[in-house]
Amino acid sequence: MKGEPEEKYQLKNGIRPCRLFNNSIACSYIRSYRENGQHPNIDVLNEVTPMVEPRPEAVMHLRLGDVARFGDCWVHPCRKGGRLYQFTKDDYDTVRDEVKNLTTTITIVANPGHKAGDVARQYSANYLENVMGYLRSLGVCPEYRGIRNADDDFAFATSAKVFVQGGGGYSRFMAKLVMKRGGRVHIPK
């Protein structure tokens, strides 16, 4: 990548961040690599991601949108290329006690329309409602943050004191940065 124009650099998922999102966190991450010649890591990500103040108490990330086209992911695991992208109710049951002990609102970060057609959007909306109902049944107050741009969601989620990881690599990156910043992470199994 060193010496290659940043707009040509392509992530594994085919996205070229600096071509599409020149002022994004992802492009800043790539620029840091190009400038110092070291492979990007969580320290670089921490430097280019703003901290939201006051820090949110609890955030849950849900991967929605394109992966929801596989059907009812609340009941049946949704996988794409062998990777799990949406957790089932049974998966969330593995972190039920930790989530139940939250004495605050948990903010849900998700975009039901992420690269999705009408069917996937509907499955995403259903999944979001199932998760919110599940949280309410535990006595936790869920609040859906609404659709924001990816950088705003990333900065907000990675500033959380407590983070419930969703499926996919984007959520794993969020979880790593939350831990780097001293937050706690709960990962459904």
Image (tube, rainbow, N blue to C red):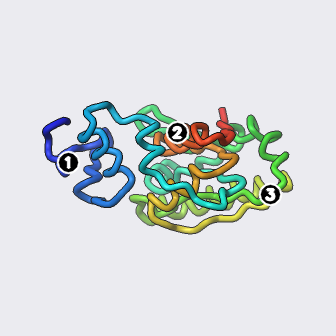
Identify residue type, mark 1: Glu
Marked residue nearer the N-terminal end (1 or 2)? 1
Measure the C-alpha gap from mark 3 to mark 1: 42 Å
Q: Are marks 1 and 2 in contact (CB under 8 Å)?
A: no
Q: CA distance from mark 1 to mark 2?
A: 24 Å
Q: Three-letter amino acid code at disc 3? A: Thr
Circle 3 — which element?
Answer: loop
Residue 75 shows in the view: no
Identify the image quadrant of the N terminus: top left
Q: Quadrant of the C terminus?
A: top right
Single out the mark in the foreground, 1 or 2: 1
Does residue 159 appear anywhere in the picture?
Answer: yes
Q: Is residue 124 above or below residue 81?
A: below
Q: Quadrant of residue 96?
A: top right
Element class at badge 2: helix
Please tell me how crowded label 1 is: few (under 14), some (14-19), or many (20+) other residues with Cα within 10 Å. Answer: some
Decide: marks 3, 1 in contact (CB < 8 A)? Answer: no
Which quadrant of the structure image shows residue 20? bottom left
Q: Residue 75: x percent and y percent?
A: 65, 45
Circle 3 packing at 10 Å, graded few (<14), some (14-19), many (20+), is some
Q: Residue furthest front?
A: 36
| Residue 104: numbered disc | 3
Residue 142 falls left or right of residue 109: right
Numbered marks: total:
3
Q: Residues within 10 Å of mark 2 (few under 14, many from 20)?
A: some
| Nearer-N-terminus badge (3/1) | 1
Say which residue appears at 41% left-offset and 40% top-offset: 44
Q: Which residue is mark 2?
A: 172
- Tell whether 77 sits left or right of 96: left
Give the mark nearest the N terminus, 3 or 2.
3
Residue bearing mark 1: 6
The residue shown at (45%, 64%) is: 149
